[in-house]
Image (cartoon, helix red, strand yellow):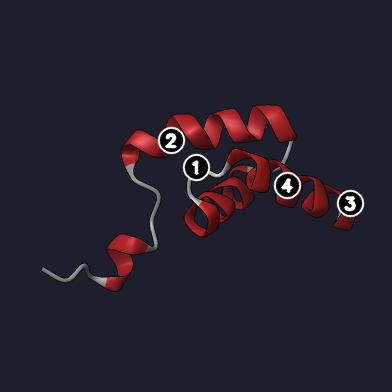
Amino acid sequence: MQRKANEASRVAKGQELEVEHLVEVTEIDREQARTLLRKHGADWPKLKDEAEALKKED
């Protein structure tokens, strides 16, 4: 069974808690958090590193 492209590009409802946690821990916005979670999944060290890099860009 093949997933539709739009299904894979969205954060699942169960991941909203992860979005909230990432926003609280790193102080990035929700859209940035969703993007990072789609890209890296639950690789929290990588998520935190990339979030820090995003904050430095702003």
Q: In the rendered view of the protein, which quadrant contains the N terminus?
A: bottom left
Mark 4 or 1 closer to N-term? 1
Of the pair 44 and 17, the residue shown nearer to us: 44
The spot of residue 16 in percent (x, y) is 43, 35
**Residue furthest toward the left?**
1
The amino acid type of the residue labelled 3 equals Lys
Of the pair 46 and 3, the residue shown nearer to us: 46
Which of the 4 quarters of the picture holds residue 7? bottom left
The amino acid type of the residue labelled 2 equals Glu
Which residue is identified by label 3? Answer: 56
Q: Is residue 36 left or right of residue 51?
A: left
The Cα atoms of the two marked residues, 4 and 2, are separated by 17 Å
Mark 3 or 1 closer to N-term? 1
Label 1 or label 2, whichever lies nearer to me, is 1
Mark 1 or 2 closer to N-term? 2
* Local secondary structure at mark 1: loop
| Above or below: residue 55 compared with residue 2 | above
The amino acid type of the residue labelled 4 equals Ala
Give the number of the disc on residue 51.
4
Which residue is identified by label 1? Answer: 42
Which residue is identified by label 2? Answer: 16
